[in-house]
Image (tube, rainbow, N blue to C red):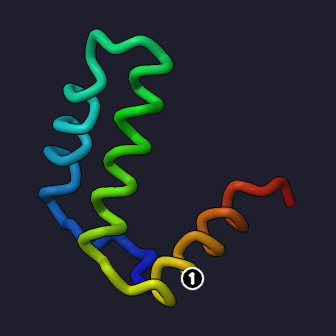
Amino acid sequence: MILQDNLGPQGDSIYTALMHAHEGLSEAESHALNARLVLMLINEVADADRIAALLQEARQAASPV
């Protein structure tokens, strides 16, 4: 599991592209875009154990301490 920056200088341009993808969308449409993107990325990873570990890590990071 890679939790540190793995994109280097490309990170800013990828973030900008993500923000542009959301421009003009309603909140519901934006959530739907994020859900589709997550499912597409999960399909790219295609490793159920790795995905489960990443989901667990993301959930722990989202929970209040």
Label 1 amino acid? Ala
**Residue 24 in which image quadrant:** top left
Using the image, determine if residue 62 lies above or below residue 5. Answer: above
Percent x, y of residue 49: 50, 89
**Residue 19 in which image quadrant:** top left
Lateral position of residue 58 relative to residue 36, left or right: right
The residue that appears at 30% across and 77% down in the rendered structure is 45
Location of the C terminus (image quadrant): bottom right
The residue that appears at 56% across and 79% down in the rendered structure is 52
Q: Is mark 1 on a helix, strand or loop?
A: helix
Percent x, y of residue 15: 26, 43
Using the image, determine if residue 21 lies above or below residue 11. Answer: above
Lateral position of residue 47 relative to residue 65, left or right: left
Percent x, y of residue 30: 40, 26
Q: Could you say which is closer to the camera, residue 23 or residue 13?
A: 23
Residue at mark 1:
53
* Mark 1 crowd level (few <14, some 14–19, many ≥20, 10 Å Cα): few
Q: Could you say which is closer to the camera, residue 53 or residue 64?
A: 53
Percent x, y of residue 21: 22, 29
Using the image, determine if residue 47 lies above or below residue 12. Answer: below
Lateral position of residue 64 relative to residue 45, left or right: right
The residue that appears at 39% across and 54% down in the rendered structure is 38
Q: Could you say which is closer to the camera, residue 47 or residue 63?
A: 47
The residue that appears at 30% across and 69% down in the rendered structure is 43
**Residue 32 in which image quadrant:** top left
Q: Could you say which is closer to the camera, residue 7 or residue 22?
A: 22
Using the image, determine if residue 34 lies above or below residue 40. Answer: above
Lateral position of residue 33 relative to residue 62, left or right: left
Outermost residue to the right: 65
Please tell me how many numbered marks the rendered image carries: 1
